[in-house]
Amino acid sequence: MKLHMRNLTKSYHSHPVLNVGEATLGEHGLEGLIGPNGAGKSTLMGLLTRRIAPTTGTVVLEDGEMNHALNPIRSHQVAQLGLVKTNQRIQGFPSLTIRDNLRFAATSHAQETYRGVMDDAQIDEEIEAEIDSYLETFTFAEPDGFANSGGEKKLLDILRCFIMKPRMLLMDEPTAGLPDDVTKKVMDLVKSKVKSGDMTVIIVEHDLELIWKYCSYVHFLSEGEMLFHGTPKDVKKNRVVAEKYMGV
Amino acid sequence: MAYLIFSLSLLLIYIGLAQMLHVQFGLLGIPNFGVVGFWGLGMYAVGIMQVQLDMSFVDAMVLNALLLAAVSYGLGHLILRLERQAILCATIAFSAIVALLAVTEKWMTMGVVGLGTIRQPFRIFGIEEILFFIFLLILIIGIQFYILKLHKSRLGRLMIATRDNEELAASLGKDTFRVKLIAFTLTSAIMGILGGLSAPLNQFLTPNMIVPSITFAVWISLVLGGKEHALGSMLGVFVTFGLFDILIETYAPVSPEFAVLVPNVKLFLYGALLVGVLVFRPSGLLDQRTPSDAVVGTLGRGVLKGAVAIHQGVTKGVATVQGKIEHRKKGGGT
């Protein structure tokens, strides 16, 4: 899956925060999006998943032969097309257990009907097996209870997206709040899913070591504009990136 | 006896309203403060169709359900995208409009003169009220059964997730607005159906029946019983309306000179209970962690034990009376 942006801008009260002329995300499997604070990275993520409406411009999701214009549709329809985002700030459903969180994300909306309430089988064996395998890989203090710490909630946020089997995943600062060993497990899993062609991934991150290590292509956003694209090697050498971001 | 049947029928109507509010507010987080509006609209609609248009009760109920669904769908479209405070205000306004229309639209509602008489749906002389009560009882038990199932279902999980974090649920591919709109339409329409069923119960309708205190009574019951628990609405109505309005106000053994005090004492105890529950059990008598099966089990055992106790008591009493009779017979013999 690829995302094409054209003349995409976002302004709040005539104050422009984002102005991306023309760009494509998702051509290289695992890509990074970096930039200083306030560059508009999270706004861009919100625009791409239709949580935020753009001021001008278009976003098109290319899925093989099909092109879906994202402008006219709502955020849940974007997710149903296979484009999903993990959250920067901790988000969750406090009334649902860890397992119910994952069941909820994995369940198709076609099964959540009024007639379905009377069915005795509310458990899907396939989904349960998948949940079990995730809970074996990632340890929670109470796997049958609720996510308690901030780290667990953040991890659950990422697992909720994994279990939906998205075709394209946007990760907004996935490592913030996660312990190092969990981050490594998450990133290794992402890498293997990308390698097997299950999904393309865009990572927004301040941890540059992680970007250099995992990403095959990097986009640089500063003051609302896409200033540079290239391989990690090119980006590291680039003078604009060095000046604007790395404080050299 | 007729009075008790009337009170118990009203109790069932209140349970039904609280059950619907449980789905709206407890599961979905929609603060509907216009319960009396939907109930009153349904009641007047059935009254008008029967008295002014001379329709049969069944026809009137079906038409009423369709009318209420259409009104709720339209209202839901207007308000369910708004914030919770706005929904609260809008639903209060809706119920105020319904109450006002009942006064002003005299050509339909007869205004403050009142609209009547509404016939009983089951016309079997002598037991029509009891039949209607049994009908209501089956309806409420059916709804309760569905709500217990709903709590364990995928749809129930979707509702709870929508209440907890609507934006997150949408980002996971769930059409949260549609979930809220359909649930609001269905539950508000059922509130209207319960209103329609209240019409033959009250027989004669006046605008002063559509008062906010009904909304508040339903809300207090739900909050007391436990707004997020499948059985909270039922328990809440039992301990408010059932305990205070039926048991204490009507059947408490009070000597005549203190009888005037009963309504005031009732209000005092009512308030004390509410404050006590809110202080010690903020999420209601039943909170989310209380398993429904345990509550049903306890209630079932309670009813069973009660039945056994009554049976034993009756047998014992009969035995005693028989013993006395025999004793007398023997005494008479000597």
Image (cartoon, coloured by chain):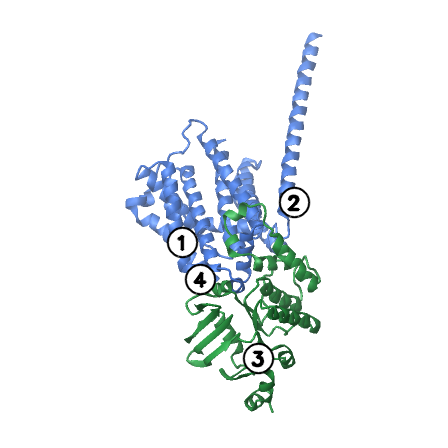
Q: Which residue position holds label 4?
A: B81
Q: Nearer the viewer, mark 2 or mark 1?
A: 1
Between residue B51 and residue A161, name the one nearer to us: A161
Q: Please state the horizontal and vertical placement of residue A164, each as a whole percent of the image.
A: 57, 62
* Label 1 element class: helix
Q: Earlier in the sequence, mark 1 or mark 4?
A: 1
> What chain letter is assigned to the residue under label 1?
B
Q: Residues within 10 Å of mark 4 (few under 14, many from 20)?
A: some
Task: Give the amino acid type for the residue marked by disc 1 in the picture.
Answer: Tyr
Task: Give the amino acid type for the residue marked by disc 2 in the picture.
Answer: Ala
Q: Is residue B6 above or below residue A8?
A: above
Circles 2 and 4: CB distance less than 8 Å? no
Same chain check for tags 2 and 1? yes
Point 61% across, 59% down: residue:
A102
Q: Which mark is residue A95?
A: none
Q: Which chain is green?
A: A
Q: CA distance from mark 3 to mark 1?
A: 49 Å
Q: Which residue position holds label 1?
A: B73
Image mark count: 4
Q: Nearer the viewer, mark 3 or mark 1?
A: 3
Between residue A22 and residue B28, name the one nearer to us: A22
Q: CA distance from mark 1 to mark 4?
A: 13 Å
Task: Give the amino acid type for the residue marked by disc 3 in the picture.
Answer: Tyr
Q: Is residue B303 above or below residue B274?
A: above
Outermost residue, top side: B334
Q: Which mark is residue A217?
A: 3
Q: Please state the horizontal and vertical placement of residue A193, each as a whole percent of the image.
A: 61, 68
Q: Which residue position holds label 2?
A: B294
| Horizontal side of residue A241 vs B71, given as left or right | right
